[in-house]
Amino acid sequence: MTQQHDATDAGRLWGGRFTTGPDEAAWQLGVSTAFDRQLWRQDLAGSRAHAHELRRIGVLDDDELDRMLAALERCAALFARDEFPFLPTDEDVHGAVERWLVEELGPLGGKLRAGRSRNDQIANDLRLWCRDACDDLVGLVGELQAALVEQAEAHLDWLAPGYTHVQRGQPVLLSHHLLAYVWMLDRDAGRLRDARERLDASVLGSGALAGTTLGLDPAAYAEHLGFSRVIENSMDAVASRDFALELLSACAILAVHLSRLGEEIVLWATAEFGFAKVGDAFSTGSSIMPQKRNPDVAELVRGKAGRVIGDLVSLLTTVKALPMAYDRDLQEDKEPVFDAVGTLRLVLPAITGTVASLTFDQDRLADASVGGFALATDLAEELVRRGVPFREAHEVVGEVVRLAETRGVDLDGLDPGELAAAHPVLDRGVADLLDARQAVDRRDSTLGTASSAVREQLRLARRASATNRGD
Ligand code: ARG
């Protein structure tokens, strides 16, 4: 037998038509203060805007408005000190604040609910919260971009192997490789900005779903809360969570990008690759193997992607097939959003520090950059320049590679005679072709890995990171 709550508990917003309060199990299922208390700032901002609107339409007089605003200030101070006195009978943050206002102000505290519903209140709060989250995350992405740009700049002309299928493909500059992440991250920042732009619409005045009869002005709320516009439809306002889904999508893609960077750092730090060492502050030891130096931070960054993807899938699944307008299922919107954004707030500074802490091994990178016949494409393209159809050139170089492989040398270990025998046009000027640095610098179009192109790219990347950091 579970216990029942009283219909007129202090925290209850809707006791009137009920003879008994909710069953304990029902109550436990619905209570959301444990997580929606994070919205206190946004909720109080909405309440301030609403108090001003109630004054404008004459529901509050000047004195009541002043007392209401002063009480909301005191309430904010309590939350800021983490001293707001929640009661077990508070169902959500909105109800808790109203209960507290009634305790502070008597009947005046009960006036604030006129013309609004928790349905438009929660939509407002979450939009405001997501707006700040977008700004924060863009800034943190900018910091990571800056760390990558700095490493790219510090190793400007270092050779590195470029991979496809985790097989050495063609030599590149290490900077080119690092800057690739800067551009992935730049699109992540762009997606966050896009999400922010679309969610930047005010919903207050929608009430439960249909608007209100009191003459409240949606534009006035937008003005108070710094929204750039007003949503067009009150049902859309209380029912839609695509703004949160967009933020979560942007978060999930960002987390996936970070997992790729994390994975690469893990690989680079292995004895097998040996391309980079992670700084002590971003490595951990083993409790049993004294020699170990593990890239745990990079691994956790990789691992957290699963959780952020889960947050997106969770909310997509909640919203799927929900009938109009507000349904209580939507209470499930908050935890995935808080979790995804909270996770990235942890992950981004940690991976930024890890990137900044990397020390690269120039010799290992340079040796690997030419290994595995990485200049075979250059040889084939030279044959093309000398008039050989690429199809034939590909065959010829394939045979040259096979020959080198059986001789146990790389392409530059073959005799000039052996090359000329493979194709008559290879009788001259082949040495330059088989030099990795020259191979890199031949790729000098704007998007290529030549030093000249990478220098220009670096300039643009620095600008992108500065924009996102808000410098
Ligand atoms: N705690 C609810 C939520 O997060 C607030 C809205 C409740 N509305 C209602 N009609 N029960 O969605």
Image: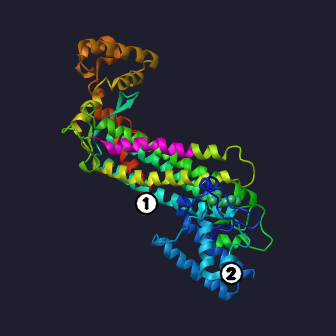
The one of 8 and 372 positioned closer to us in this rendering: 8
**To which quarter of the image does residue 296 belong?**
top left
Q: Residue at x 61, y 77 (%)?
A: 101
- Pick out the residue farthest to the right: 213
Q: Is residue 94 visible?
A: yes
Q: Relative to residue 177, is residue 219 depicted above or below?
A: below
Distance between mark 2 and mark 1 Cα atoms: 47 Å
What amino acid type is highlighted by mark number 2?
A: Pro
State the residue position of label 1: 469
First reached walking from the N terminus: tag 2 or tag 1: 2
Q: Is residue 225 visible?
A: no
State the residue position of label 2: 107
The one of 169 and 312 positioned closer to us in this rendering: 312
The one of 422 and 362 positioned closer to us in this rendering: 362
Q: Relative to residue 349, is residue 437 depicted above or below?
A: above
Q: Is residue 304 magenta?
A: yes
Q: Which residues are magenta?
A: 294-312
Secondary element type, mark 2: helix
Secondary element type, mark 1: helix
Q: Residue at x 81, y 71 (%)?
A: 213
Residue 10: x and y in percent read 63, 70
What amino acid type is highlighted by mark number 1?
A: Arg
Q: Crowdedness of circle 2 by 10 Å Cα count: few (<14), some, many (20+)?
A: few
Residue 147: x and y in percent read 35, 52
Tell me which secondary structure the magenta stretch mostly adopts.
helix
